[in-house]
Image (cartoon, rainbow, N blue to C red):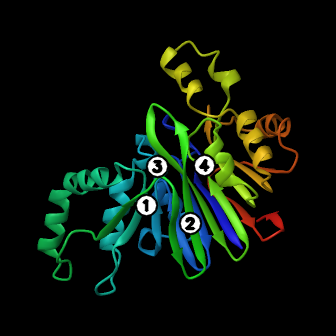
Amino acid sequence: MIEVTLLGTGSPIPDARRAGPSTLVRAGGQTFLVDCGRGVQQRLTAAGAGANGLTALLLTHLHSDHIADLGDVLITRWVTTFTPDAPPLPIIGPPGTAEVVDATLKAFGFDIGYRIAHHADLTAPPPVDVYEHTAGVVWDHDGVTISVAPTDHRPVAPTIGFRVEHAGASVVLAGDTVPCETLDQLAAGAGALVHTVIRKDLIEAMPMQRIRDICDYHSSVEEAAATATRAGVGILVLTHYVPSIEPGKEDDWRALAATAFDRQIELGDDLHRVEVHPGVCRRA
């Protein structure tokens, strides 16, 4: 079984009810954080996890709303890990990830120096191992395999999606993208597809051109549903709602997805959980 928890279902626009984009994936005793938008630490705690328990951090792309709390995750993992010689945190993302991680650690340089000076058991900066990929298998440990493929969020490039597989169960995390063949291939036959979505019908009516611009590089609810149908996935999990879903309007979003996808559709508030089983998919 693979457990998916929507830690943050929000967008770049601050929302009192929704943290920034982030998803927790638990599989085979391993814990993966996919993206780390604002407020991810609070949501991790609410989900019964923590930065010091992460197996790896997976980044779909380097847009600010998806990496806003990267520094917080790195520092918190460092100062709350008490085992000697703790292994570095693997960070897997597209090209450019290493530069962003290096810059983030540099930005926290004063803080890191203060803590090393104050705590005798902290003798070096937060340990990380960064891996940059655009395609292929990027993780294969203890029965859990992760593959990546390019997605299309241009002019943001490169961007990637992740496919997590364990004991016959599989989950694909698309990140921000428009429909594209490489995502279809990555998601083919998966138990679940976690896909970011926008309501183009609502956004196109807004007066600000800068807001309307997002329509050309995100998938609408219907487009994400069509991707899920082409790929033949079992469950479509919607997240990163733009604009935010108004309370009581969840069925409207679900109905739009149902016009293009006739299987299980999941959406909800932060901390919504979905279990994905081999051949059997059910809501947690």
The residue labelled by disc 4 is: 174
Residue at x 80% of width, y 57% of height: 234
Residue 79 sits in quarter: bottom left
**Mark 4: secondary structure:** loop
Which of the marked residues, 1 or 2, is nearer the chain's N terminus? 1
The residue labelled by disc 2 is: 146
What quarter of the picture does the N terminus occupy?
Answer: bottom right
Of tags 3 and 1, which is closer to the observer? 1
Q: x, y percentage for residue 271?
A: 63, 57
**Mark 1: secondary structure:** strand
Q: Is residue 138 above or below residue 179?
A: below
* Residue 47 in sight from this viewpoint: no
Of tags 2 and 4, which is closer to the observer? 2
Q: Looking at the picture, tell me which residue is in the foreground, 23 or 278.
A: 278
Residue at x 39% of width, y 52% of height: 69
Bin the neighbour count of mark 4 within 10 Å (Cα to Cα): few under 14, some 14-19, many 20 and up: many
Q: x, y percentage for residue 93?
A: 43, 55
Residue at x 53% of width, y 60% of height: 136
* Residue 153 in sight from this viewpoint: yes
Amino acid type, callout 3: Gly
Q: CA distance from mark 4 to mark 1?
A: 15 Å
Which of the marked residues, 2 or 4, is nearer the chain's N terminus? 2
